[in-house]
Amino acid sequence: MNKIGRSLFNVLSSLIISCFFTLALGSSLWGQSREIAHFTVKAGDHHRMNTPVGVSLEGMSLGLQTGQELQLYEVVDGKEVAIASQLDESGDEKRLRWILGGETPRGRNRNYILKSEGEGRAPSPADSVQISDDGMSLTLNVDDQKVLSYRYVPKPPPDGVSDLYARSGYIHPLWTPEGEVLTRIQPSDHYHHYGIWNPWTKTSFEGREIDFWNLGDGEGTVRHKALTQTTEGDIYGGFRAFLNHIDLRAPSGEKVALNESWEIKAWNADPEQDIWLIDFISTLNPAADSPVTIKAYRYQGFSLRATEKWNDETAVLLTSAGKNKSNGNGTRARWTDINGVSEGGTSGILFMTHPGNQNFPEQLRIWPTGANGGEGNVYFNFNPVQEQDWTLWPGNSYSLKYRMMVYDGKIDSVDAERYWQDFANPPEVEVQPTGLAGSRVLVYTRNGEGYVHKNIPNSIEAIRKLGRKHGFAVDASEDPSDFTEENLKKYDALIFSNTNNDIFNTKAQEKALQKYMESGGNFVGIHSASGSERDWPWFWSLVGGTFYRHAPFQEFSVEVTENDHPSTSFLTDPWVREDECYYLKQLNPEVQVLLHADMSTVEDDQKGDYPGEVFGDTFPLAWYHEFEGGRSWYTSLGHSIEDYDDPVFMNHVLGGIQWAVTGGSFK
């Protein structure tokens, strides 16, 4: 090994030792309490009562990888009051959910602080919403009171009835808080009725007409396929189930025509447990290369067959349009309240539909007064396809959202409208991530003689967009005369975005940067910032190294070295992207590596000379370190213009700015 090689080897060894030491120290620091964000919940134009709310945590470093737990506090009269919340990871992004407890008058705001807490945190209570499984059905319970059961094993028909009527994938029983069962299955008048279910009556698939509702015709059926997720928690519990709509008369045998997923959430919304709130989302996807057309018909979709106790004499129905059981059939409504006799007096279900649904507000199918001989004749559905066809195209997803409020006693139309507004127009949640709000940064883009990146205007606008979203001010300059001790005092961080070559004109400007860092200033470097000031060793140490060369622009794998940092905590591992793989020299052994290149995925004819011979199969791409009283974060990624429209890359940069400004400091 030559002298230069030995020197680089020694630097790498120091770097690795430093990384391990800093990791150990960092894990201790990240175990303390820190603020993540402030939330303002706005009631808006509606009076709220025990309302579910949620907010995206996208781009926020939560510290969960290091054993931290989230704790939400409401700020009441200047004091922080701990309240229950729950992390929802069922969708494409992490969301925090909680209940806006008690009454919130229209126009009022309520304020919250989300913290990440470690040791010393009060133990979490037992989950209030739990799931039991008897091998045939899942049952959701709130504080040991039954809410609903989902049947995933086929229910055989009554004796002497065709096996075609067997079915799975439905809700029954649905209980009230006092334990009254409000649903019914397989009644002798309609063996294909199954509590709460969601089939389609008239469909067209590959030239065949298929009825998935009237099971006795033998054209189609619906079967539960799989349970892919169950959730228990203090705020909600639920499950995700997949169902198949099966064409029983396909030429080559049974064929799945339509896939459906159900996402069910039961909310622990009422501290007195006087009501249940249940969300139902059905997502439909054609299962083959052919479309499925749901043809207009009078009954199909999200449906209820109610308890046999309810009939013309013992139950009443009221829609948001003021219609009732005698005149509501075929009309449109955003909610329908159905109430009838129960052991304790009366009980009911308020059905609500969402403005985002197909053909909102959907038409209703209601058995009118006198139907079914007047006995056990409470039947209802929201039908988005009562008067016009709906074609579902392969490769697309179609969702329908509903909410049920189940209760004992009675409600009036004012109550019903308030519950619907909570569902259709939930309170707005304004987010202010802590640490950056109120900060000011300078984006510096000076380039000396040589190559100038075309991405600079895009990077400035992208960082300004981050500033608008997260509450920090952004100044941009390519003028080195801005580097004076007095001027730099205005900034919480200096962001060198794709600077390159000689970027200062005088020693005084260089001295101002040094003084800024010594005074506790913060530095963020993006991509070719490492190619700046190539003859100034102090600047190399600030950045963490100095540019040597790069491999050709290409797709390669970026591996996450540290996954609990705000700039990396959300990344997939590996993170496959198109970029330039930068090679730096004079690496500062104090840096803590965040990302590294998998060199086996980088095509470069010269990588055997450097760095391959010395560094093997990896090379650092992003890092951070404390430096002369301040903080420095650098990423070598970000060559293309498109990177600055990429939310993943910009979250990477945002996390770097967050760390530079706040240092992960904890309260």
Image: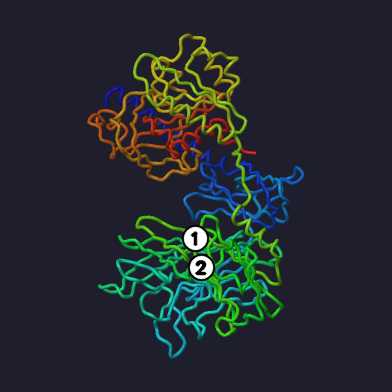
Sequence-wise, the earlier of marks 2 and 1 is 2
Q: Residues within 10 Å of mark 2 (few under 14, many from 20)?
A: many
Residues marked 2 and 1 touching at CB (< 8 Å): yes
Labelled disc at residue 557: none
Nearest the camera: 407 or 367?
367
Q: Looking at this rendering, what residue extends furthest in the right direction?
A: 77
Quarter the C terminus occupies: top right
Work out how far the residue at label 2 is from the one at label 1, CA to CA, in angstroms: 9 Å
Q: Which residue is mark 1?
A: 400
Q: Residue at x 33, y 66 (%)?
A: 205
- Three-letter residue code for mark 1: Leu
Coordinates of residue 383 in the picture (x, y in percent): 50, 66
- Three-letter residue code for mark 2: Phe
Coordinates of residue 516 in the picture (x, y in percent): 56, 19
Q: Which residue is mark 2?
A: 302
Nearest the camera: 335 or 67?
335
Coordinates of residue 243 in the picture (x, y in percent): 42, 68
- Seen in the picture, residue 424 relative to 202 is either above or below; the reply is above
Q: Looking at this rendering, what residue extends furthest in the left direction?
A: 605
- Seen in the picture, residue 339 relative to 425 is either above or below; the reply is below
Horizontal side of 227 relative to 266 (left or right) equals: left
Q: Looking at this rendering, what residue extends furthest in the bottom direction?
A: 160
